[in-house]
Amino acid sequence: MSTPAANFNEREHVICQIARLVEERYIYWVGGGGEPLSAALLAKQVHAPNLQYLTEDGVVGPEPLVPFDPLMTMIAARANYRALQWQTMNYAADVAHLGYVDYGILATLQVDRYGNVNSTVVGKYEGGEGRRFGGPGGADTIAALAWRTILVTDQQKRKFVERNDFISSPGFLDGPGARERAGLPPGTGPWRVYTPWAMFGYDIDCQLMLQGISPFVTVDQVLEEMSFRPKIAPKLERLEVPTEEELMVLRTKIDVAGQVTDRGRWIEHRDGKYVFADR
Amino acid sequence: MRILQEGRAEYLKVDPDGYRAHVREHKPHQMVSKLMTHREAVEKLVRDGDYIAYDCNYFQRGPASLIREVIRQKKRRLWVCGKFTYVACALLVEGGCADRIDIGFIGFGPWIARAVREKKCTINEYSNAIMTLRLKAGAMGLPFLPARSFGGTDGFERSGCKLVEDPYTKQPIILVPAINPDVALIHVHQADEYGNARVFGTGIAHQECALASRRVIVSAEEIVSTEEIRRDPARTSIPHFAVDAVVHAPFGAYPGTVQGYYACDPPGVVEAMGAMYRGDFTEYLNKHVYSVGSHEEYLEKVVGAAKIAEIRRRETIREGYCI
């Protein structure tokens, strides 16, 4: 069942990367939807049945009944089925303030050199000129208080920018010490950024560093889709493609309607290599 | 206390003494029946210019029927507590009811974007949990509470928060200003006629919202006896003395879910989301708000018995919901 898949799309690939990081010995606060929640649900189905996660409605460690109704990734009975505890948002924030949340998993519209998160506006904020999005929601609390934050976004030039159009939730802000100066607890902050093409960590100066690459792209292709040049690790990890088992769970149990995964390019295994499909 | 940095947005005046005086003068200390219709409750308790909070949202155990009534009654110049919400803010802005929003998370859509560009709507930036913490401060009778999040963001600059030196640890810490909303709309599973109310499952800040707000309308799926409340007091989420009106609103969260009672209606959710993303709620408001005079008529003529049966049937999970 752990056969590498021959056909999958970018979204499925990145969800699998994040799901594989998830371990039962940690507590996660997961963004309420999209790739972050799909990754947690996938991990719980495939290798971490006792995974404990919170969402911002104050659910602790549910065993959700998948698939969910559209948008009903929080509050709803299916999402919060067989939880260990039902609470509210301030309780979730308290738990994170206390230091119980080992990892936060979040999606972002943009990410900059210091791993800051934008979920507010692309373009100019003032005067309402830019393209406006919903706001930080629960992400600010997660990015401020989780010990380590994992971000997911697309590998596109407009998404990897020198400085975000708006910092909705904090990464390393503008470098070492900035989080502490802004009142955030020490020892917390960004840890990884995943895109379908690559994986980034951070160096000692809190700057993004390319650490891993998917088998269907080259380093040059990744750098081409960034507005700034990141540091590059001396040895790059290969991001293994989804397995047939992961894809089956993702497609038949978690994202049956394709709400999360039904976008992005397709990849196929052809002549011993993974390449973008023509379709 | 040394202030290190301050947001520059206007925030609802912080006045814990004024709130205490209000509680003494106007809150129902005695157990009195507060049952009324949607129309009566909104007429009596929602006023033009109010700061309004609602808990959860139009899709997730929110007071959807009360929000529709607020729009039907053409309330004006509301300042909305926009946390954990998708379409309700857009409905209120497009319905002409709201012109200021404190944002945690809202479904923005082109309509609000346009209103902001045309300076018809003011936005202040917070996060969901900063907004619920502001309500918690209001619910504790305090002027502010500290938080170790929100610092360093661009939202901070556009909020009413402050970064100060904590007098105990000498470290920088964020302070959030309390909110005591003028009015709150809260949808619950069960309430008695006095307003002792039960929410089952998770929530956002229903208890904080109720205790922090000057006027509170609770809409309930079921009206239960006070005997039933007394049978299991640990289940009481909101006490009667915080509540000013109790509205019986079966399927009051439609098209959203009330966990354990009924599932959401996916086509109903998609219809509202679609209208928001198109930036045109005209048709939606006509069909779902203006075409009927009451929630009862709405259930009968717009939603229909077959749909109601379907959403009840689709909610298969009962464990934990006290049914």
Image: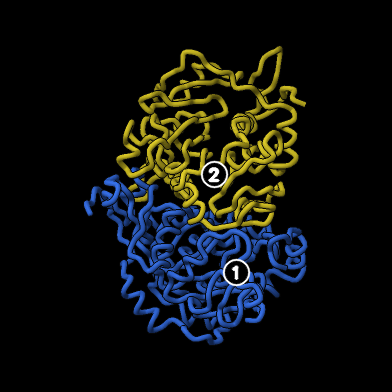
Q: Position of residue B7 (x, y in %)?
A: 29, 52
Q: Tag on residue B234?
A: 1
Q: Position of residue B318 (x, y in %)?
A: 73, 61
Query: Which residue is drawn at the image coordinates 71% and 47% (left, top)?
Result: A67
Q: Residue furthest left?
A: B2
Secondary element at image label 1: helix
Q: Position of residue B87 (x, y in %)?
A: 53, 58
Which chain letter matches label 2? A
Q: Disc 2 marks which residue?
A: A29
Q: Colour of chain B?
A: blue
Residue B231 in sight from this viewpoint: yes
**Which chain comes out yellow in the rendered image?**
A
Label 1 is placed on what type of residue? Ala
In this view, the residue in front, A9 or A232, is: A232
Q: Position of residue A275 (x, y in %)?
A: 64, 19
Q: Callout 2: 10 Å neighbours few (<14), some, many (20+)?
A: many
